[in-house]
Image (cartoon, rainbow, N blue to C red):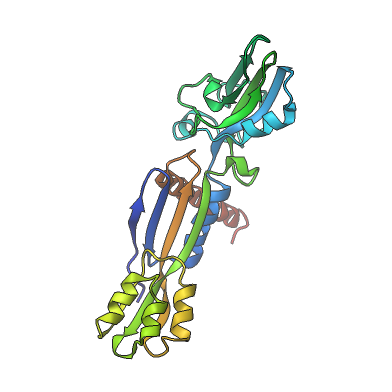
């Protein structure tokens, strides 16, 4: 009998989400993980045109930093055409591109230079803005100036990492710890100090099992179980329960990343079915 399918949010904040997924194939969860990195679109600078730059920093370096500047993209996903639709579109196409201008100048009489940050971006769409306004783009000294116009569009991580909305996307089985406190030595208790729940269970002197939802890395616990805790600890992994951990770059809310990844997977599955039907299978 197949296990009931469910999804529970273990933790969620502005940058990270951990989800307990039960009853789904490992391949499905892994597909979501990979699509979160490669296929969920975000907005990022793709072209930069320089009209003036007499600083000590080359155009290419400034353009690179602009490209890696994280732009909030939650609203952009519904306002702009997909990367496929905008392929080959001219810069400035309103449905495809957001225009960004930076113009900075310091008089030679200024006493010191300054760092220009992402806050200096003048963006044509108020719904697209830097996720981290304090991101340093370049340094400008007295008597120097920079004037540039950049164009940002939706893209996917498989094109370039700057379009990937996730900085971390991992999945792991839920570890199950079987314990027998009557066989736990002092050396064993000392060994598992990094796992307070396990130590508390062993100190109780009883037998039982517990699931570790928070402790992602169990290599240290396995070492303890195989050495000084032999007979007192045994670790297995429940292949029907996985924890999907997504950390956002700031371009999209973490829960939105998972939602968009499921849409990408559904789209691919439908396309596969269409191809199969076309072949008459």
Q: Residue at x 71, y 32 (%)?
A: 61
Front position in the image: 62 or 236: 62
Front position in the image: 60 or 23: 60
Q: Is residue 201 above or below residue 22?
A: below
Residue 41 image-quadrant placement: top right
Q: Residue at x 46, y 66 (%)?
A: 172
Residue 23, position as x, y percentages in the image: 38, 67
Q: Is residue 31 above or below residue 102?
A: below
Which quadrant is the C terminus positioned in? bottom right
Q: Is residue 160 above or below residue 2?
A: above
Q: Is residue 50 above or below residue 265?
A: above
Residue 154, position as x, y percentages in the image: 57, 34
Using residue 130 as the reference point, say whether residue 275 is left or right of it: right
Residue 174, position as x, y percentages in the image: 40, 70
Q: Residue at x 50, y 59 (%)?
A: 170
Using residue 63 as the reference point, say whether residue 78 is left or right of it: left
Which quadrant is the N terminus positioned in? bottom left
Res. 86 visible in picture: no
Residue 280, position as x, y percentages in the image: 60, 58
Residue 242 image-quadrant placement: bottom left
Using residue 276 as the reference point, say whether residue 19 is left or right of it: left
Using residue 186 as the reference point, say whether residue 79 is left or right of it: right
Front position in the image: 198 or 176: 198
Res. 58 visible in picture: yes
Q: How many marks?
A: 0
């Amino acid at each position: 009998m197949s296990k009931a399918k469910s999804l529970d949010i273990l933790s969620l904040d502005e940058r990270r989400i951990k989800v307990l997924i039960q009853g789904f194939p490992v391949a499905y969860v892994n597909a979501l993980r990979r699509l979160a990195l490669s296929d969920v679109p975000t907005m990022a600078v793709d072209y930069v045109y320089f009209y003036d730059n007499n600083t000590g920093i080359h155009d290419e370096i400034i353009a690179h930093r602009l490209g890696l500047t994280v732009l909030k993209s939650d609203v952009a996903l519904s306002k702009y055409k997909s990367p496929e639709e905008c392929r080959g579109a001219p810069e400035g196409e309103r449905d495809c591109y957001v225009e960004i201008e930076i113009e900075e100048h310091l008089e030679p009489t200024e006493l010191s230079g300054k760092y220009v940050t992402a806050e200096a971006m003048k963006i044509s769409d108020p719904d697209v803005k830097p996720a981290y306004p304090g991101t340093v783009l370049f340094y400008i000294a007295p008597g120097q100036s920079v004037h540039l116009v950049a164009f940002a569009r939706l893209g996917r991580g498989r094109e370039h990492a700057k379009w990937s909305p996730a900085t971390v996307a991992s999945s792991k089985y839920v570890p199950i710890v079987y314990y027998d406190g009557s066989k736990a030595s002092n050396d064993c208790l000392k060994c598992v100090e990094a796992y307070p729940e396990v130590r508390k269970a062993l100190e109780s002197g009883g037998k039982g099992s517990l699931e570790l939802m928070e402790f992602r890395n169990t290599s240290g616990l396995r070492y303890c179980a195989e050495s000084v805790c032999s007979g007192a600890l045994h670790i297995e992994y429940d292949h029907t329960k996985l924890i999907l951990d997504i950390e956002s770059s700031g371009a999209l809310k973490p829960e939105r990343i998972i939602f968009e990844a499921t849409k990408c997977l559904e789209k691919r599955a439908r396309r596969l079915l269409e191809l199969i039907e076309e072949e008459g299978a």
